[in-house]
Structures are given as C-alpha cells and as structure tokens.
Amino acid sequence: MSNKVNRSELNSDVLQSILERLSIIDYLKARSVCKNWYIVCKQMSPIQDKFPWIISFPRRRPKSSTCQVFNPKEGKFYTLRNLGNDFSTHQCLATSGSWLLMLDLRSNLYVLNVFTRERIELPTLESHQGRLQVHRLQNNTFTFMINQSSVSASNVLNRTKAVLWVDEKTNGYIVVWSIGLSYIMYTRSGFDFWREIPTKEGPENLHGCQDIVYKDNKLYVLSRLNRIRILDFSQELPRALLDNVDDDPFRDETRLSKIGVTVSGEVLMVTNRLKQVFNILKMNSDGTSWDEVESLEGEAWITDLGVTVPAVDGTTRPDSIYYRDGSLYCGDLSIQVLEMVFNVHKDGHARWFIPRLREL
C-alpha cells in the first residue's frame, strides 16, 4: 500500500498552514501547482513578507524587461521578468508593498506591481496645475522652469523625494513627488493631472522639502530647516494641520535628515555621520521638540518606506533601522552604528521594500 499523499488532495486547513509559511516567491510558485492549491490561495488573506527585501537596478544594465530582488534573510537573488520594455533602465522612486513608482526613459511616471504585473499609468508632467513649466527636449529628457529658474532633469533626479501609497483592495493610489527642494506636487486616483503643494507661501508654509512620508492619510514633510509640516490627505484637497514642530534639533550644525512614523503614529528623525554612526530622535508628547530615543519599542524602521514595522522573531531585527545612503545599511539602535548590507556601485541604485501580494 502506498504512503504517498496526492498534493491536490491535501486538507485545505493544512495546505493554508503550509502556504502561510512560504516566502512571496515560493508562494507564487505554489499557487500554480494545481487547481485546489490556487483556490486555497484565493481564499487567503494578502501575503506579506515580514522581512525587508532589496530591489536592485545595477549600473550599466542592458535594456531588458527584468529586474533583480534580493532576500537578505535567504541570501538569494531572484530575477523578475516580463515587467515591460526597457524596465531595467527605469528609475524606482518609491514603493508601496510590491508596487513601484517608476520613471521611464521618456520621463513618464507609472506604478507597477512587480509580482502581478498590474500597471497604473500616471498623468503626464505637463498636466500639472501650478507654477511649474515642463519643457521636453528632443531626446525625451526635460527641463523644469520654476519662477524663471531652470532645473535640468538630471539635477531633479539627484534631489528628488517621492512617496507612493496603493490600496491593495481597490488599487486606489496617492503619489507625492518633490522636485528638488522647493517644489512638491501630487496626484491621486481619479485625477488626470498633477497639482502643486505650495512650499514657500500659503498656510502650509513648508519652506522647502528635505524628506516626505505618507501614513494613514497624512503627509509628513521635513523642511530644509528640519521642521515638520503635516498635511491631511483624507479629502480630495490636502489640508495643513496645526500640529507642526518648529524646533530644529540641529540648529547649530548642518545635517541631512530623514523622518519616519511609528506604528502608533509618533514622528521620528534620524541623521548619520560618515555613513556609520547614527542617532534617532522622537517628537515629544507635546509636539514641540525632539527627544533622543534609546529604543523603538521592539519595532524596526525601514527608512525607504518612512515607517516602522513590528519586529517578529526570525524576521526584522527589533530596535533597528534599515537605511539607504547610496548603498543599503542596517543599524542596531543600542550601538548606533550602520553596517553595510548591500553595496551599490556608482550609477546603480537599489532600495528597501516589503513585498506584499493579494490575489486577483
């Protein structure tokens, strides 16, 4: 009598227990095993890896429809294919789960899910409503004109900041893009244009943009003066909130900083020196100044996402920061030292992301 078990006849509860333990890549393979496995996958909640992955675009990469992702936990590279013509040469500006905000060679922005291949075309840059003037050149690059000042595309990309949020159920989205330090614009589901968020006048009084984070319908902007401005995005038009922080913890010295938001909604700021030593500050309970922190309450901060995530045994390291400054680093808050995890060569780029997969 054979003891072999037919995979297609596994009990659905047992099968679901197995599938929940798989990585995103293995899960994608498993749902193609047979009809029964696919049905069980359809009934499961969205799958999200609990460990941050790396998406990599190496330098001097040939034009292709592929890219590489790296799972640091496994120490393995995976090649994702059929992502679109010349995808390997496009630039990734932000991520939301498995969705990427991409800028192509023709200076067009789009959003792509690298696992399901779903794609969202975004409005052209020329469609914006604001002071920005876009002049496309014959080689498909462009220059920006802001208040009679011209900025080349290359300079913009060297100083750009962006955030992406995608609703996994409806594919509704919000994209905010900071061009250089002095111009921010956004678009969202239902818009066929980009709209300016004033940085130097109006109630927002942003005074430029050094970093931006989006979480729970709020946009957090770190100004050039290391001050926080918060905008409510719960309505069609963003509204400035009064709970801003005007205190600059580094007023006596010049430091480039990044901000983040914890699971409970507390605002963090981090700086690093010589790409090695870092320190993290947290907005105090009054929202008026910053306190140095010695713990992230067991959470891990993924700076490319702008948020912290709960650290689970065997996944993200608690009280740690996953950082990008050209190459990718991970640092333990107890010793405040960054260790390189992934070396990015000149002209290449990579960033942290946490894969998430829903069924179609």
Image: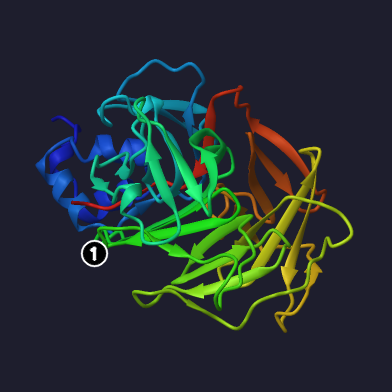
Image check: 113 left or right of 346? left
Percent x, y of residue 317: 63, 49
Q: Is residue 347 above or below residue 272?
A: above
- Name the residue: 12% across, 45% down: 36
Name the one closer to the observer, 280 or 11: 280
| Residue farthest to the front, as pictured | 148
- The image quarter in which residue 310 lies: bottom right
Number of disc labels: 1
Q: Is residue 196 above or below residue 274?
A: below
Image check: 31 left or right of 278? left
Image quarter hosting the N terminus = top left
- Name the residue: 62% across, 81% down: 243
- The image quarter in which residue 266 lies: bottom right
Name the one closer to the observer, 201 or 29: 201
* Residue where numbered disc 1 is placed: 190
Can see residue 309? no
Residue kind at label 1, given as amino acid type:
Gly
Percent x, y of residue 85: 26, 26
Secondary element at image label 1: loop
- The image quarter in which residue 280 lies: bottom right
